[in-house]
Amino acid sequence: MRMYNVVIPVHKSDWPLLKRNIPYIFKYINPKFIIIISSSELEKYLKNMDRILFLDENKVFGGLSYQRVEALLRQRNGSCKRTGWYFQQFLKMAYAYCCEDPCYLLWDADTIPLTNIPFIYKNKYILDLKDEHHRPYFETIKKLLGINKIKTESFIAEHMIIDKMIMKELIYNIEKNKDLDGEFFFEKIINAISRKDIDGSGFSEFETYGSYAVKFYREHFSFRRLSSLREGKILFGDNFDEKTLNWISKSFDIVSFEKKSKQDRDIAFICNNWLVRCFKLKWIWKLYKKIKQGVYYD
């Protein structure tokens, strides 16, 4: 039974990749609808697409816009190079006020599911865990909510199932924090980030929501680890086909083609050899990382 929508904030320049990913999201996630949050320029491309809905990024939450986030960052640190990165996180949080269902699934535009992936089991939401610890995220969470790191693992995955009432409660508690300047949650978040971190990665909506949800609503959640490959672009560039995705699916549940990654032509040549594809990609990837020692994939 389809119980929730998939919500994807996306920049118009990333639409060609997302368009390729959409059939796989419907096939393996099977949402009611895919909600695409973007600028009004993208809306014309979505007309007459089945089970695709458009939401203007400037109409998700009163006062929240790209221009407002940019101005806040300039005021805070004089630099706005991370405006889009912070803005899309705030949109993911603010969608809780638009959601008509009990929950919604956030999904990264550059990520393709390769197997059936449920996010609710036995009336519990499933949160996916990874191995990562970025200290500035937790310093910001402490300033916002007064809570420490909850789990050894990280909640930063390519997706997250959100209980809208928990998210709205989280936002309410951020906004009532009198120790931080600002009226709205996104203003207080920007003011909570250390000046030394704001031009980098000073806040994570996934770490913040995951920490809050598990701290106060642990009984509503279960946890798992999916096998994911973030470095799809390194291995295959942007030109992947159905056969390639089928081969990847033998080793991984999810693959991402991140814009910031750079294709390695040597490994791409190897991976496109039909003899090599007799072996599992995870073995080849493990060997590649050992040889490169992090030069490409870190």
Image (cartoon, grey):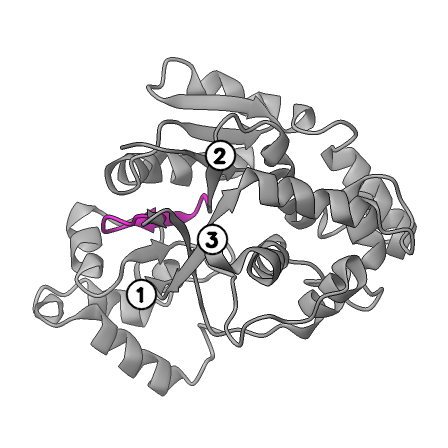
In the rendered image, the quadrant that contains the N terminus is top left
Mark 3 vs 1: CB contact within 8 A: no
Which residue is at the far front? 219
Residue that label 3 marks: 220
Q: Earlier in the sequence, mark 3 or mark 2?
A: 2
The image position of residue 148, as x and y in percent, is 69, 71
Residue 20, horizontal then vertical, whole percent: 33, 37
Numbered badge on residue 227:
1
Q: Amino acid at mark 2?
A: Pro
Which one is in front, 211 or 230? 211
Within-10-Å neighbours for mark 2: few <14, some 14–19, many 20+ = few
What secondary structure is marked by label 1?
loop
Q: Residue at x 37, y 13 (%)?
A: 48
Q: Secondary structure at mark 3?
A: helix
Query: SS of the residue at dot 2?
Result: loop
Q: Which residues are magenta?
A: 108-119
> Please, is residue 65 above or below residue 145 in the view?
above
Residue found 81% across the figure and 44% down from its top: 175
Q: Quadrant of residue 24?
A: top left
According to the picture, the residue beneath numbered tag 2 turns out to be 102
Q: Nearer the viewer, residue 297 or 102?
A: 102
- Local packing at callout 1 (Cα closer than 10 Å; few below 14, some 14-19, many 20+) is some
**Residue 121 appears left or right of 125:** left
Three-letter amino acid code of the residue under disc 1: Ser
